[in-house]
Image (cartoon, grey):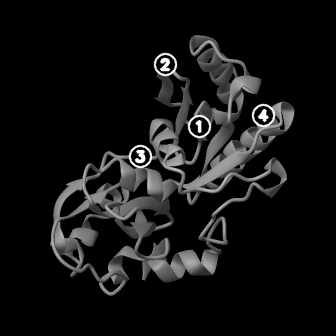
């Protein structure tokens, strides 16, 4: 499949284009400059892959959770490009990408949700299934959030770097290895989309997976967390 993948859920701008010959990738930290840099780099990747937008079979994007503004940028760009070329969109959760890169069958993916919280989910990649919902957790109260059966589990994602206390939970002690440097990556989205497990949707049905339904804590909530 010829696909474009877009992720702006973190401070990285992650883009990839797959052709019949190769996959070309742009994956760099851009801070808050996703909106101004994304489209020029998409155009450059298409040129490098010797494709036009209309040659593609679809546009993949990181559905969330992640940065609220970043998620909206990726979704809006995917919708706009897909509408322009009459293509479907393929939304894929960001934690699915993190888990896919872990190099293991049983994975706990965990990313930093900011505001002293993390996003968390467990996976059996042998069957291709997410075993738990994508959870929003308080790291200090995360001991009962997961139940991991068997052994061979690894952890992946920057949530483990942001909240080392997670490795002291009951399920955290079951992790044989932890890869805290893994982030959502456009090349991973391409591999997931090509698996056929994710639905292709009309651009008007593109949606986001926020998990957290609040952008910021109130002053009272911030004070409560500091006690």
Residue 21: give its label. Answer: 2
Decide which of tag 2 and tag 4 comes sooner along the chain: 2
Circle 4 is placed at which residue position? 81
Query: Circle 4 sits in a helix, a strand or a loop, which is it?
Result: helix
User: Looking at the image, do the residues carrying marks 1 and 4 touch, with CB atoms under 8 Å apart?
Assistant: no
Q: Quadrant of the C terminus?
A: bottom left
Residue 167: give its label. Answer: none
Foreground mark, 3 or 1, reads 1
Marks 3 and 2, how far apart at CA = 26 Å
Residue 197 placement, left or right of 165 = right
Foreground mark, 3 or 2, reads 2
Residue 5: give its label. Answer: 1
Q: Residue at x 65, y 26 (%)?
A: 37
Decide which of tag 3 and tag 2 comes sooner along the chain: 2
Foreground mark, 2 or 4, reads 2
Decide which of tag 3 and tag 1 comes sooner along the chain: 1
Circle 3 is placed at which residue position? 183
Instruction: Classify mark 2: residues with Cα within 10 Å, few (<14), some (14-19) or many (20+).
Output: few
Q: Nearer the viewer, residue 158 or 56?
A: 56
Give how far across and how far down residue 200 sits, in percent: 68, 51
Q: Residue at x 54, y 51 (%)?
A: 196
Quadrant in the rendering for residue 177:
bottom left
Q: Nearer the viewer, residue 71 or 207?
A: 207
């Amino acid at each position: 499949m010829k696909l474009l993948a877009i992720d702006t859920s973190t401070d990285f701008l992650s883009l990839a284009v797959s052709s019949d010959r190769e996959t070309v990738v742009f994956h760099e930290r851009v801070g808050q400059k996703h909106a101004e840099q994304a489209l020029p780099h998409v155009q450059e990747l298409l040129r490098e892959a010797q494709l036009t937008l209309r040659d593609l079979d679809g546009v993949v994007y990181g559905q969330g959770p992640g940065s609220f503004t970043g998620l909206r940028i990726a979704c809006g760009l995917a919708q706009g490009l897909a509408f322009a070329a009459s293509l479907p969109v393929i939304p894929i959760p960001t934690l699915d990408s993190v888990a896919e890169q872990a190099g293991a069958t049983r994975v706990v993916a965990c990313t930093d949700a900011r505001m002293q919280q993390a996003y968390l989910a467990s996976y059996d990649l042998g069957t291709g299934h997410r075993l738990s919902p994508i959870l929003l957790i308080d790291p200090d109260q995360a001991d009962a959030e997961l139940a991991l059966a068997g052994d061979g589990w690894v952890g992946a994602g920057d949530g483990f770097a942001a909240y080392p206390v997670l490795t002291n939970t009951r399920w955290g002690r079951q992790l044989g290895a932890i890869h805290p440097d893994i982030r959502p990556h456009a090349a991973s989205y391409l591999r997931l989309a090509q698996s056929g497990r994710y639905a292709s949707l009309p651009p008007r049905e593109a949606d986001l997976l926020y998990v957290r339904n609040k952008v910021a804590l109130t002053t009272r909530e911030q004070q409560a967390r500091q006690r």
